[in-house]
Image (cartoon, rainbow, N blue to C red):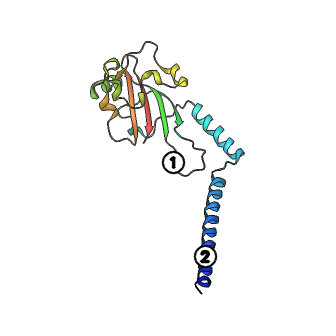
Amino acid sequence: MAMKTRRPLLVALLGASAAMLLAVVGCVAAGFLLVGDDSAETRTCQESVHAAEAKVRTDRWDPPEDLPGLGEYPEIHWQLRASGNPCSRMPGPTDWAYQGVVKLRPEDAQWLAKRYEFVPYESVNLDELPHDSSPADVWPALTPFLPTESRWLHSRSYNETDPSPRWRVAFLDVEHQTLVFMLNDH
C-alpha cells in the first residue's frame, strides 16, 4: 500500500519539476529573444548615435545652471558622447558625457577667475580631478576651438558649485577668454 501512495507523489514531483524546468528554459529563451538585436533597427540606431556624437553643436548650453557664471558668451562649441549603449534593448537609462569650449566676454572670464578662485592648472592635485580630466583630454573635434598658447586655470569650487545633476570639471584661460567644460551624468 505504501508503494501506491508514493507513486502519485513521485509523479506529482516529477511533473512539477518538469513544469519548473520548462518555465526557466522559457524565461531564458524569452530573455535571449528580447536582448537579441533586430540588426537593421540596431544599425540605424547606432548610425544615429555616431552622427549625434560627431556633431559639433553651437546652440547655447541648456540648462545654464550646469555652467554657472558664463554670462552672455558670444560663442560655444560642444559635443556629447554616450557612456553606455543607448541602442541596447536592455532596460535602463544611458549616461552621457559632454565637452565644450566656450568663448567668454573678457569681463566674464575675469569675474569667473575671481569668483571661483581659479588657480594655475599646474598647481592642482590631479588626484582631485574626476575621470582623469585635463585640458589635454578635449575631444579631437573641439581642439580647433582651443587657444594655441593657453594658460589653463582650474577651480575645485567651480566644479562643485550647485546645482548640477552632472559631474563638472572646467578649465579657464582668462587671457584668451576661454572655458573648457567636461560634464558627466550621474
Residue 170's spot in the image, x, y percent? 39, 28
Residue shown at 57%/34% (left/top)? 53
The quarter in which the C terminus is drawn is top left
Residue 51, by quadrant, is top right
Give 86 or 64, whichever is nearer the viewer.
86
Q: Mark 1 points at which residue?
A: 93
The quarter in which the N terminus is drawn is bottom right
Give the amino acid at mark 2: Leu
Residue 48's spot in the image, x, y percent? 64, 39
Q: Mark 2 points at which residue?
A: 10
Q: Is mark 2 on a helix, strand or loop?
A: helix
Residue shown at 57%/50% (left/top)? 90
Real-space Cα separation, disc 2 to disc 1, in angstroms: 47 Å
Give 159 or 106, whichever is nearer the viewer.
159
Give the amino acid at mark 1: Pro
Residue 17's spot in the image, x, y percent? 60, 69
Residue 109, by quadrant, is top left
Residue shown at 61%/35% (left/top)? 50
In this image, 23 relative to 177: left or right? right
Give 172 or 8, whichever is nearer the viewer.
8
